[in-house]
């Protein structure tokens, strides 16, 4: 099975030695996305909900570059710097999975995220 890096110019460039996503067989592993604007590489939003909106846009762009969508996502992990933001982030997240069975998910509180963002989300998808 070939291992292929997937990238989208509609999502932020990697800020370290990693790929936006890796496809191996039918599995697609997306690196965690934080709320960076792909054009400016600046954090978008101050609230967790605002930041989660940008995170989900970034994820959609990387999924799209692989020919996938949120319907192909089977597992997510949400990282929050404050679990008090859970409800706000959950509301944004839930919109992306309306009308379908949501993926398996873990949510954890962490002490800090890159660029001092409030939320990061990583996903695993199965492709076609």
Image (cartoon, helix red, strand yellow):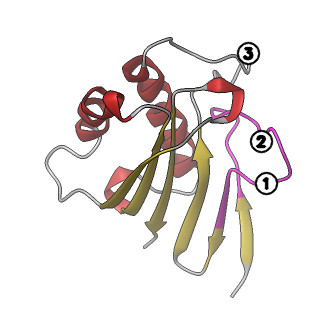
Instruction: Please give the label number shown on residue 40.
Output: 3
Residue 16 magenta = yes
Circle 3 sits in a helix, a strand or a loop, which is it?
A: loop
Crowdedness near tag 2: few (<14), some (14–19) or many (≥20) residues, C-alpha within 10 Å: some
Crowdedness near tag 1: few (<14), some (14–19) or many (≥20) residues, C-alpha within 10 Å: few
Circle 2 sits in a helix, a strand or a loop, which is it?
A: loop
- Structural distance between the alpha carbons of marks 1 and 3: 19 Å
Looking at the image, is 8 positioned above or below residue 74?
Answer: above
- Structural distance between the alpha carbons of marks 1 and 2: 6 Å
Q: Which residue is mark 2?
A: 14
Q: Is residue 50 left or right of residue 112?
A: left
In x, y percent, where is residue 9?
70, 35
Magenta stretch secondary structure, dominant: loop
Residue 127 magenta = no
Q: Which residue is mark 1?
A: 18
| Residue at the farthest left position | 99
Q: Which residues are magenta?
A: 6-22
Q: Which of pointers 1 and 3 indicates the residue nearer the eye?
A: 1
Circles 2 and 3: CB atoms closer than 8 Å: no
At x 58%, y 56%, the residue is 30
Circles 1 and 2: CB atoms closer than 8 Å: yes
Give whichever of discs 1 and 3 has the lower sequence position. Answer: 1
Q: Quadrant of residue 37?
A: top right
């Amino acid at each position: 099975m070939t291992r292929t890096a997937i990238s989208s110019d509609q999502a932020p460039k990697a800020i370290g030695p990693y790929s936006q996503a890796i496809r191996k067989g039918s599995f697609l592993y997306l690196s965690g996305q934080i709320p960076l604007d792909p054009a400016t590489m600046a954090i978008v939003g101050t609230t967790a909900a605002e930041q989660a909106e940008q995170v989900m846009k970034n994820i959609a762009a990387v999924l799209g570059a692989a020919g996938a969508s949120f319907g192909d996502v089977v597992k997510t992990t949400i990282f929050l710097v404050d679990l008090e933001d859970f409800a706000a982030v959950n509301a944004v997240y839930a919109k992306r999975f309306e009308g379908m069975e949501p993926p398996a998910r873990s949510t954890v509180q962490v002490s800090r995220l890159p660029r001092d963002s409030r939320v990061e989300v990583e996903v695993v998808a199965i492709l076609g």
